[in-house]
Image (spheres, rainbow, N blue to C red):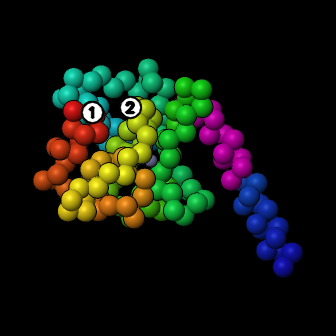
């Protein structure tokens, strides 16, 4: 029992340490860069300049303790940090990954909150829905252009 407790302590301490060292990290995790580039491209297509450096946006892949959370945008006095959960990221396909990064950038780059509006057929009106319980995400090649218009405010 004591051994388990001390192991738990070591894990807790090391995760606190990682949490602390986070604050000094800069840049966008290389595995996320392609999705950030796509978001900037889609913004540019709609006349929006998305400059991650000017917006102070950094991003990383980490273990998020709360199992219901896929990712988060943390905005601390204009320093914006996106974290996506490592396990979920590893199991996501390309469309899921794009959805997740675009959703978090909706918060961090576009300043959007959540909207849980639902189309008559049960699909989500926006990529900015709060949970999957409220609507059917239905993010695919057919719906992508309309959902991105909605995301960028067009
Ligand atoms: Zn969100």
- Comparing 81 with 144, the one in front is 144
- Comparing 135 with 60, the one in front is 135
**Where is residue 12 drawn, in percent x and y?**
74, 58
Closer to the eye: label 2 or 1: 1
SS for dot 2: loop
**Where is residue 40 drawn, in percent x and y?**
29, 31
Number of residues whose C-alpha sits closer than 10 Å to that of mark 2, classed few (under 14), some (14–19) or many (20 or more): some
Q: Are marks 2 and 1 in contact (CB under 8 Å)?
A: yes
Query: Which mark, residue 110?
Result: 2
User: Which range of residues does the magenta coloring cover?
Assistant: 15-26
Q: Quadrant of the N terminus?
A: bottom right
SS for dot 1: loop
Seen from this angle, which residue lies furthest front?
120
Q: Quadrant of the C terminus?
A: top left
Instruction: Determine the residue positioned at 56% across, 56% down.
Output: 63
Q: Which residue is mark 1?
A: 153
Based on the picture, tell me whether residue 21 belongs to the magenta stretch: yes
Instruction: Determine the residue positioned at 51% across, 57% down.
Output: 69
Toward which corner of the image does residue 135 lie, by quadrant?
A: bottom left
- Comparing 117 with 6, the one in front is 117
Seen from this angle, which residue lies furthest left?
142
**Where is residue 18 drawn, in percent x and y?**
66, 47
Instruction: Determine the residue positioned at 72% across, 49% down.
Output: 16
**Where is residue 127 drawn, in percent x and y?**
32, 48
Number of residues whose C-alpha sits closer than 10 Å to that of mark 1, classed few (under 14), some (14–19) or many (20 or more): few
């Amino acid at each position: 029992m004591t051994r388990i407790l001390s192991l738990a302590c070591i894990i807790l301490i090391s995760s606190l340490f990682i949490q602390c060292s986070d604050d000094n990290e800069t840049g966008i995790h290389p595995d996320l860069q392609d999705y950030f580039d796509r978001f900037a491209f889609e913004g540019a297509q709609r006349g929006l300049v998305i400059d991650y450096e000017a917006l102070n946006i950094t991003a990383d892949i980490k273990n998020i303790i709360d199992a219901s959370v896929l990712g988060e945008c943390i905005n601390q006095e204009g320093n914006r940090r996106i974290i996506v959960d490592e396990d979920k990221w590893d199991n996501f396909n390309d469309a899921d990954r794009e959805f997740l990064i675009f959703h978090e950038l909706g918060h961090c780059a576009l300043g959007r909150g959540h909207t849980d509006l639902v189309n008559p057929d049960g699909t989500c009106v926006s990529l900015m829905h709060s949970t999957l319980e409220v609507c059917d995400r239905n993010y695919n090649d057919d719906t992508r252009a309309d959902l991105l218009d909605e995301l960028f405010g067009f």
